[in-house]
Image (spheres, grey):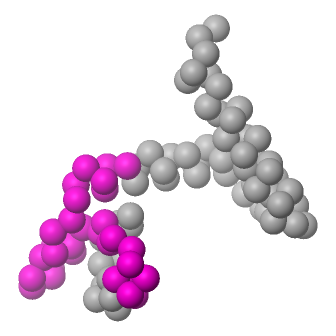
């Protein structure tokens, strides 16, 4: 999933070679617009908002941790902390 800025034949070709479905809307100036799955594209907004909330934690935004294991562990912890209010009513 990407926005219109990534609508390039080279990017689409690279994704196709990796067997990845490109969910990228066509730019308005593209001669032959390539269709995309609008339902899947709507999920992009939710993913971007999640990353925005995660980056509010300085440790994640600056990649303070030295190892990928501790970094991903903290990302999982913060993700769970962000998820709890939506699951449990207080």
Comparing 56 with 70, the one in front is 70
**Residue at the (31%, 56%) spot, across then down:** 41
Q: Is residue 17 magenta?
A: yes
Inspect this view and state whether residue 5 appears: no
- Image quarter of residue 89: top right
Direction from residue 73 to residue 10 in the image, left or right: left
Q: Which residues are magenta?
A: 14-43
Inspect this view and state whether residue 77 appears: yes
As drawn, 29 above or below 63 = below
Find the residue positioned furthest to the top: 90
**Residue at the (34%, 83%) spot, across then down:** 16
As drawn, 34 above or below 9 = above
Q: Position of residue 42 (x, y in %)?
A: 31, 49
Comparing 28 with 69, the one in front is 69
Q: Position of residue 44 (x, y in %)?
A: 40, 54
- Image quarter of residue 78: top right
Comparing 88 with 8, the one in front is 88
Find the residue positioned furthest to the left: 32
- Image quarter of residue 67: bottom right
Q: Position of residue 83 (x, y in %)?
A: 61, 31
- Which secondary structure class fits the magenta region best? loop
Find the residue positioned furthest to the front: 19
């Amino acid at each position: 999933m990407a926005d219109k800025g990534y609508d390039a034949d080279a990017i689409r070709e690279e994704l196709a070679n990796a067997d990845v479905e490109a969910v990228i809307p066509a730019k308005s100036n593209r001669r032959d617009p390539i269709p995309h799955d609008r339902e899947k594209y709507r999920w992009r907004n939710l993913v971007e908002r999640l990353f925005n909330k995660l980056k509010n934690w300085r440790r994640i935004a600056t990649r303070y941790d030295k190892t990928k294991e501790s970094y991903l562990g903290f990302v999982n912890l913060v993700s769970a902390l962000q998820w709890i209010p939506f699951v449990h009513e207080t």
